């Protein structure tokens, strides 16, 4: 019999511990099983779990052992009784000027059609399906259809170069690939089919079939016997009824490859039950999302944020979710705010880089639209600098701006503010406090000793077991999972985030940068984040990236690449030198001369991935005259070329 929560039970669970977040968090780590057993009531189970957490084989954690559930059921089917005609998926493309709303009833039908196509191609529970798609509704249908069948999807960012895509195909060994003819970015067509065909040619693994969504953006030639037209297959299954496949809680829901790695890609493996519960709890506690509301996450489904908070999280929470294809400044810098007004968005989730882009637009666009529905703007993906946080806070008339910090590996936030438990102020520059379920510790990287005092810099680690929703292991490589994440701190079996951090007297954390981005200047260890924060405080600096560059005398020196808010006059050498001197004085005053960059170069753009992450390692490689490596995720190749030319002088 289906075990499902009653509305009154859900309300009780959410409100039970709203008095004190300190108590709420303490209970989540000290009375772990009781806490998570309560959260498990937020989702439907075909068979109730028999054991909350099995941690008999550290660091491998199994959550809700013996339980049976289905991710698609919890995201779609269970809402049909109460909200079948409510908006579920809102597809918006400013590239093709399309907007279409799918109700939960519509979404249920489309997912079953996609599932029927996959089922006819032999996709069963445990089979892999690789999804190589732009930000279109069919991509969401494919993800949910895989979950419905108990298949394991692996989404690869649309437009990935053939070699990188081939490594993922080979590692995931999918039975079927779902793709499209092309994607669009800033009006430019990016044909996917040639990239996919070449990737399959390069890969030792060959999928049985490829389902092609033809957007009619780029002509292509189907491969006979392998490629199928989605629209043609969909027509065959208009009335399809495909029941959800109930799977063990520990059954993998998907794999997702981490970006920026070298060598063999790391396939983060996520479970089903733990992930469903983690996302269900995060909606009210962290995001204050309520059923019937609207969630707008501006990420891409190729990244973990897109998995958790475009597709699964909002739908599990009974919200409408916006799937957006386009740029934040096309047709103008007010497009996101227009969507907030039109669809009465309650919760918005974006990245600091996107907000910095919007800083360059007409500030009047922020006040042009009715944003009264918006409760909060969440930002993640990279550290949020204080000037950017203040700018957007003022622009949104004091709306809550909440940073949050997490990783592909964790699946949901490690650090943030849980206003759904207890209201707390945000601190600009800090993602907040440790989230419930996470036993976060700062440790000395040399001795492994825990740093208990305030304002001590250490490596941010998490004691096992990792909470529900975090990675189970790396796909096909348990040994690498243990060695990579659990064996780096001397004498302790703890998960390393590989990030430096400090914690203030009130328990707020401040992320200082990657441990592998540390700059060692004449024996002084400096985080790039510290220097970037200091440079960003100069009134004429819009954005900056700092890297450590090899130096024969000092070992390394800091080198900065900055975008000026007002670049008029910087064509003259004297003006550039004047601004460079001012920036160095700011760093001297705030951090001391040891942190002063050797140079500050002024650029018009910084090298970033299409999701907005700075490519610091590529910048460092170019600055040191090395090959920057795989740049398939880079948004604008000319940005790195500009840096190379500046370095050469």
Image (cartoon, rainbow, N blue to C red):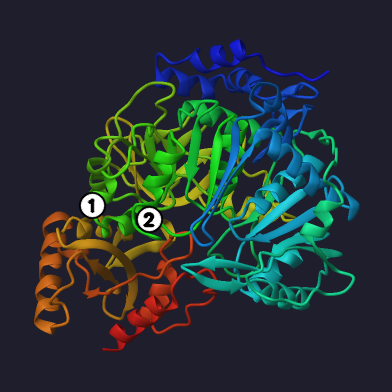
Residue at the disc numbered 1: 363
Residue 320 appears at what percent x and percent y? Answer: 55, 36
Q: Residue at x 16, y 77 (%)?
A: 570
| Rendered view: 577 above or below 317 | below
Q: Quadrant of the N terminus?
A: top right
Q: Which mark is residue 426?
A: none
Which of disc 1 and disc 2 is earlier in sequence? 2
Q: Position of residue 80 (x, y in %)?
A: 70, 27
Left or right: residue 637 versus residue 93 is left
Residue at 41 percent of width and 64 percent of height: 614
Residue 232 seen from this side: yes
Residue 464 shows in the view: no
> In what element is the residue under mark 2?
helix
Q: Is residue 398 above or below residue 33?
A: below
**490 above or below 286?**
below
Secondary structure beneath label 1: helix
- Dot 1, how many residues are within 10 Å of its Cα: few (below 14), some (14-19), or many (20+)? some
Q: Is residue 71 left or right of residue 502?
A: right
Query: Quarter of the image holding residue 525?
Result: bottom left
Label number found at residue 354: 2
Horizontal arrangement in the rendering, residue 573 relative to residue 150 (left or right): left
Would residue 559 be found to the left or right of residue 226 on screen?
A: left
x 53%, y 65%: residue: 260
In depth, the one of 22 and 555 nearer the eye is: 22
């Amino acid at each position: 019999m289906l075990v499902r929560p009653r509305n009154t039970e859900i309300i009780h669970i959410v409100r039970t511990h709203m008095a004190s977040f300190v108590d709420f968090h303490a209970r989540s780590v000290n009375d772990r099983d009781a806490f998570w057993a309560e959260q498990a009531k937020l989702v439907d189970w075909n068979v109730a779990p028999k054991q909350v957490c099995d941690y008999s084989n550290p660091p491998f954690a199994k959550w809700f052992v013996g339980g049976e559930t289905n991710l698609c059921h919890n995201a779609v089917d269970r809402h049909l009784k109460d909200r079948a005609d409510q908006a579920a998926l809102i597809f918006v493309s400013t590239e093709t000027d399309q907007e279409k709303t799918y109700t939960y009833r519509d979404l249920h039908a489309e997912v079953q059609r996609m599932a029927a196509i996959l089922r006819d191609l032999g996709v069963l529970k445990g089979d892999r399906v690789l999804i190589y798609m732009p930000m279109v509704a069919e991509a969401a249908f494919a993800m949910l259809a895989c979950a419905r069948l108990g298949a394991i999807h692996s989404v690869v960012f649309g437009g990935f170069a053939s070699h990188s895509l081939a490594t993922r195909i080979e590692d995931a060994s999918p039975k079927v690939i779902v793709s499209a003819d092309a994607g669009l970015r800033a009006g430019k067509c990016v044909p996917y089919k040639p990239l996919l065909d070449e990737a399959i040619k390069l890969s030792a693994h060959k999928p049985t079939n490829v389902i092609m969504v033809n957007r009619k953006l780029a002509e292509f030639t189907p491969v006979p016997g392998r490629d199928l037209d989605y629209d043609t297959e969909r027509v065959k299954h208009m009335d399809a009824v495909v029941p959800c496949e109930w799977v063990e809680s520990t059954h993998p829901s998907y794999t997702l490859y981490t970006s920026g790695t070298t060598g063999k890609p790391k396939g983060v493996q996520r479970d089903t039950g733990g992930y469903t519960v983690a996302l269900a709890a995060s909606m009210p506690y962290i995001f204050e999302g309520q059923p019937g509301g609207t969630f707008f996450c501006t990420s891409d489904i190729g990244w973990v944020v897109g998995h958790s908070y475009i597709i699964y999280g909002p739908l599990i929470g009974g919200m409408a979710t916006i799937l957006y294809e386009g740029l934040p400044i096309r047709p103008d810098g007010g497009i996101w705010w227009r969507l907030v007004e039109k669809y009465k968005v309650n919760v918005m989730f974006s990245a600091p880089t996107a907000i910095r882009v919007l800083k360059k637009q007409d500030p009047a666009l922020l006040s042009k639209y009715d944003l009264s529905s918006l409760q909060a703007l969440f930002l993640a993906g990279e550290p949020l600098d204080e000037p950017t946080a203040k700018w957007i806070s003022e622009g949104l008339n004091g709306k809550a701006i909440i940073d949050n910090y997490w990783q592909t590996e964790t699946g949901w936030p490690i650090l943030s503010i849980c206003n759904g438990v207890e209201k707390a102020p945000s601190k600009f520059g800090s993602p907040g406090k440790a989230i419930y379920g996470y036993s976060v510790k700062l440790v000395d990287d040399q001795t492994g000793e825990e740093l208990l005092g305030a304002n001590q810099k250490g490596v941010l680690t998490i004691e096992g077991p990792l909470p529900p929703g975090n990675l189970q292991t790396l796909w096909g490589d348990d040994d690498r999972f243990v060695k990579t994440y659990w064996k780096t701190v001397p004498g302790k079996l703890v998960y390393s985030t590989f990030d430096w951090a400090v914690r203030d007297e009130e328990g707020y954390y401040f992320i200082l940068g990657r441990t592998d981005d540390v700059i060692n200047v004449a024996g002084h260890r400096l985080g790039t984040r510290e220097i970037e924060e200091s440079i960003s405080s100069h009134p004429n600096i819009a954005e900056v990236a700092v890297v450590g560059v090899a130096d024969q005398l000092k070992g390394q020196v800091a080198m900065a690449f900055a975008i000026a808010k007002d670049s008029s006059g910087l064509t003259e050498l004297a003006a550039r030198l004047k601004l460079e001197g001012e920036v160095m004085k700011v760093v001297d005053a705030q951090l001391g001369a040891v942190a002063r960059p050797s140079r500050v170069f002024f650029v018009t753009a910084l090298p970033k991935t299409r999701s907005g992450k700075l490519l610091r390692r590529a910048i460092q490689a170019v600055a040191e005259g090395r090959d920057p490596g795989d740049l398939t995720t880079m948004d604008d190749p000319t940005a790195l070329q500009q840096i190379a030319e500046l370095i050469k002088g």
